[in-house]
Amino acid sequence: MAIPGSSSATTVTEPAGRAPAALTPAGPMPWQTARVVAIRRETARAKTFRLALPGPSLHRAGQHYVVRLTAPDGYTASRSYSVASAPDGSPEFELTVERLEGGEVSTFLHDVVEAGDELEVRGPIGKWFVWDGGIPAILVGGGSGVVPLMSMLRLARATPRSPLVRMVASVRRPGDLYYADELLGPETTVVYTREAPNGPGRPVGRLTADDLARIVRPDAWAYVCGSSGFADHASHLLVELGLPIGQIRVERFGATA
Amino acid sequence: MAKTTRGFVGGRTPDRDGRLPPGQYDVGDEWPVLTAEVTPRLDTTRWTFTVEGLVDRPMTWTWDEIHALPGSVYSGDIHCVTTWSKRDVTFGGVSVDTLLDIARPLPAASHVLAFCHTGYTTNLPLADVTSGQAWVAWDHDGRPLPVEHGGPARLLVPHLYFWKSAKWVAGLRLVDHDEPGFWERNGYHNHGDPWLEQRYDGD
């Protein structure tokens, strides 16, 4: 999956804790060499890459890193990938990458990269789609859009803040759910749009207002992440449920390959 | 010099004619949608565009009024900070020069803050939105600009990364100082020149 960057966001009062604006920053964020310490398959199309930096990863939940590949002739290709692991002060962090057919970087990461390889990364990036705890959060993810939300959920579960977070993850089929062994819990709901697991449960179908009504609370910030169509659908449902538009943060994945 | 990545040969999107800024790839026929907010539903019967601040004549145009101004077309490339570029895109609208010729910036005006119907903002030096470099665009390839791409109208400043081309633009405020906008406060570069790879804060 890959990230924001281009236009538009909401007016909105910024939550407390945001760094003040700086017109004259100290200098460029450096490229760092990260070692691939483990690769884990999430679904047929997604793998998680556990990377180790020379020093601590200073990411906040929801941020992303840029991964840069360099050919012997100097040609480079870079893409952004959301961090799935919680901020924990360690040098290791995880990126979950969906393999996009024809995608220059995602196919390379899936098909070529092995544990022990080194990758150049730059980050963490983005100060908008982040949750640091403290405020109630509604996490709504479609497909690979669950990745940055997983960082938030893991952060919440690692602290006494867990009750502040509610998640709805929407996937087509059970086999498409990332982090399936870990994501399920009292604060999470999974919506299956095409095919559901056997047994009782919600009928298959597109995310509805009812799915979100149970987790919406007026003092919460919503974090919506997924394809453009999913993000539009989910964010408009939240607006219809009365959540102020300024409390909805959206991250869309374009077709960044 | 970047460190070579084991096994990577790359070169799938060769820069045929020097039109791809460094670190960009050609997205081809796709046009990714990347926004940080709820897509607004804007009615052109109530839509307005305002030029205000340090101008001799603050102006607000309705949809019909702005369409009555002399039109202008941009044909060329656009570049997103997330590394995709799209070639040979055609946008129709009105040149920002035309709007400023009417509103007449005061001598003290040095920057503009573009603001949107959603609340999104982005900052630009006045020199980056004049001399045929910026548009308020409402057509794409001869058709109305789709809402997910900023319709009914967006700012178009194609020589800078595309987050400067604010979707759902509502107006320009002329000011005598630089004031970071939305992404400029949230980790991205203040100016955003793709040829200098001004992607993130500090680049």
Image (cartoon, grey):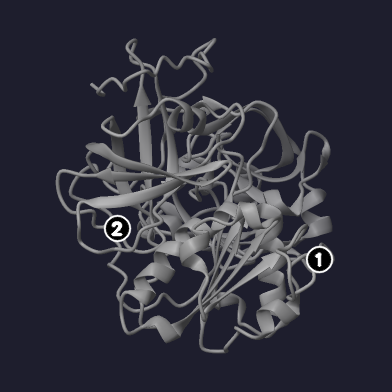
Q: Nearer the viewer, residue A242 or B187?
A: A242
The percent coordinates of residue B160 (x first, y second) are 48, 38
Report the side of A210 relative to A82 (left or right).
right
Name the chain under label 1.
Answer: B
The residue type indicated by label 1 comes to: Asp
Q: Nearer the viewer, residue B33 or A206?
A: A206
- Which-is-in-front pick, marks 1 and 2? 2
Res. B9 visible in picture: yes
The percent coordinates of residue A98 (x first, y second) are 54, 42
The residue type indicated by label 2 comes to: His
Q: Nearer the viewer, residue A115 or B57?
A: A115
Give the position of the C terminus of chain A as an image quadrant: top right
Residues at badges 1 and 2 in contact (C-beta under 8 Å)? no
Where is A178 relative to B87, above or below? below
Give the quarter of the image for residue A189: bottom right
Report the side of B3 relative to A8 (left or right).
left
Is the residue marked by circle 2 packed among few (<14), some (14-19), or many (20+) residues within 10 Å?
many
Are labels 1 and 2 on one chain? no
Query: What residue is rendered at 37% in x and 64% in y?
Result: A61
Report the side of A54 relative to A102 (left or right).
left
Q: Nearer the viewer, residue B5 or A47?
A: A47
Q: Which residue is mark 2?
A: A59
Numbered tag placed on residue B43 in the rendering: 1
Where is A192 relative to A5, above or below? below
Query: What residue is rendered at 69% in x and 59% in y?
Result: A230
Is the residue marked by circle 1 packed among few (<14), some (14-19), or many (20+) residues within 10 Å?
few
Residue most toward the bottom?
Answer: A218
Numbered tag placed on residue B103 in the rendering: none
Report how far apart the C-alphas of labels 1 and 2 lie in the structure: 40 Å
Name the chain under label 2.
Answer: A
